[in-house]
Amino acid sequence: MPETSFQGQAVDTAPASAAFLVIGIPGSGKSSVSAGLARRFPLGAHIEGDHLQDLIVAGGRLPSPEADLEADRQLLLRARNASVLARSFHAAGVVPVIDDVVVRRAHLDFYLEHLKDLPLRLIVLAPSAEAVARRVAERDKVLADDWSFLDEALRTELGGRGTWFDTSAMTLEETVDAVLAKG
């Protein structure tokens, strides 16, 4: 194997043309849409909030319907880490697509502060409660709690923020096409 030198090799190039934050309640299609969206670019990265949470292998606390300050702190930690990755990919010419459950104004504002100065597109996936229930029942990933109550919080606290898509009757490809068409 020939010896290779990385001396002088630039990681950062021309910045990416866009960055995306795809939000919605559990079961709204965030991960599938985000992965599909990232694949549409010559260089795209899917940054999944749940996977960042999984990096905490000791003492990890998942959000729950009950108040839990440590779980809330870890939720913001994962948002900060997703933002750091997005900034790094963006600087290297890779379009970052973050997906995370974001339904509260304070959580969204935290993300927006950490992603400021990027050409960010906020995408809100908001299928009907019935469509979400059907998707959750059909998926391999089992949710520990019923999170359907978050739909009201999403619509109340984040209404008017970002570009909203009711994907109840849309396929994955149709949703990705619609997101790109709103560009």
Image (tube, grey):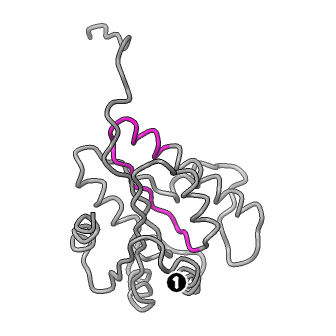
In the image, is residue 117 above or below residue 102? above
In terms of depth relative to the viewer, which is nearer, 107 or 120?
120
Q: Position of residue 110 (x, y in %)?
A: 61, 59
Residue picked out by circle 1: 155
Q: Quadrant of residue 22?
A: bottom left
In terms of depth relative to the viewer, which is nearer, 160 or 140?
160
Q: Position of residue 136 (x, y in %)?
A: 44, 80
In terms of depth relative to the viewer, which is nearer, 23 or 113?
113
Please state the total of marks drawn on the protein image: 1
Asked whether 93 falls inside the magenta stretch, the response is yes
Label 1's element? helix
In-image side of 21 versus 67 (left or right): left
Residue at position x 42%, y 84% in the image = 132
Q: Position of residue 134 (x, y in %)?
A: 39, 87
Magenta residues (range) = 85-103
Q: Position of residue 59 (x, y in %)?
A: 73, 53
Residue at position x 33%, y 66% in the image = 33
Residue at position x 23%, y 55% in the image = 40
Asked whether 164 falls inside the magenta stretch, the response is no
In the image, is residue 183 above or below residue 43? below
Q: Quadrant of residue 153?
A: bottom right
Q: Quadrant of the N terminus?
A: top left
In-image side of 93 versus 149 (left or right): left
Q: Quadrant of the C terminus?
A: bottom left
Q: Label 1 crowding class (10 Å Cα cut-off): few <14, some 14-19, many 20+?
A: some
In the image, is residue 172 above or below residue 12? below
The extreme bottom residue here reads: 130
In terms of depth relative to the viewer, which is nearer, 66 or 19?
19
Q: Amino acid at mark 1?
A: Arg
